[in-house]
Image: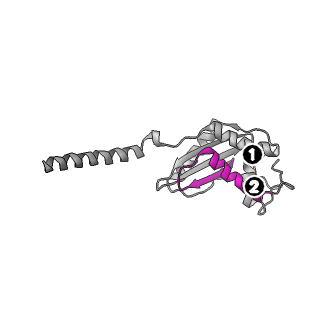
């Protein structure tokens, strides 16, 4: 009787462990972005400074997703150096769209609303925020990926790019 119980329990644990390994790699486990929330949170901050609403672009989202997938292999934060403005966010735990945009916008405390001109060096602490509110950026796309060794990485690209030295954010 003990052997049967041991065999049944062992088989169950083996099956359970195989099931968990499989679910880690299924497509349904891949994080997704609620574009409505992501755009709404951007537009919340943009409206506060009078910047026009920004819109979702699927081509930009594909670009951002490809970069997020590449970064997720090592989970090192690195800009793509592509033709777009870019914000990147890493977290040790999954985040939602509002939390990610709010994190970028938290840099507002370093932003000079009396002189919203982007200045090399002086604007570096508020660069994520200034890109969120950059009036000339009219569209964005974003991607999110789970890092191979844990954590989550978000990439958002903006077109036209913001944070242009000598130009005003709004």
Question: Do tag 1 and tag 2 residues touch (Cβ < 8 Å)?
Answer: yes
Residue range highlighted in magenta: 82-111
Q: Earlier in the sequence, mark 1 or mark 2?
A: 1
Find residue 1 and report its horizontal and vertical position in percent. Answer: 12, 47
Q: Is residue 98 left or right of residue 66?
A: right
Circle 1 SS class: helix
The quadrant where residue 159 appears: top right
Q: Is residue 14 visible?
A: yes
Circle 2 SS class: helix
Q: Is residue 136 visible?
A: no
Find residue 23 and report its horizontal and vertical position in percent. Answer: 40, 43
The residue located at (78%, 52%) in the rendering is: 164
Residue pointed to by mark 2: 108
Magenta segment: does it hold 109? Answer: yes
CA–CA distance in space, label 1 to label 2: 10 Å
Residue pointed to by mark 1: 45
The residue at the far front in this view is 1
- Looking at the rendered structure, which numbered label has been put on residue 155? none
The residue at the far left in this view is 1
Pointer 1 local density, CA inside 10 Å: few below 14, some 14–19, many at least 20: some
The residue located at (86%, 56%) in the rendering is: 115
Magenta segment: does it hold 155? Answer: no
């Amino acid at each position: 009787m003990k052997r049967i119980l041991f065999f049944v329990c062992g088989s169950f644990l083996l099956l359970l462990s195989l099931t968990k390994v499989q679910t880690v790699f299924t497509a349904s486990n891949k994080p997704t972005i609620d574009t409505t929330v992501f755009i709404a949170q951007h537009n919340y901050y943009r409206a506060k400074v009078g910047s026009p609403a920004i819109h979702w672009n699927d081509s930009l989202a594909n670009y951002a997703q490809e970069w997020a997938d590449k970064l997720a292999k090592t989970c090192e934060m690195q800009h793509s150096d592509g033709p777009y403005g870019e914000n990147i966010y890493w977290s040790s735990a999954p985040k939602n769209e509002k939390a990610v945009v709010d994190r970028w916008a938290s840099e507002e405390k370093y932003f000079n609303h009396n002189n919203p001109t982007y200045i090399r060096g002086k604007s570096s602490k508020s660069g994520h925020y200034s890109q969120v509110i950059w009036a000339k950026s009219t569209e964005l796309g974003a991607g999110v990926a789970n890092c191979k060794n844990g954590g989550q990485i978000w990439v958002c690209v903006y077109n036209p790019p913001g944070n242009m030295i000598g130009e005003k954010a709004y």
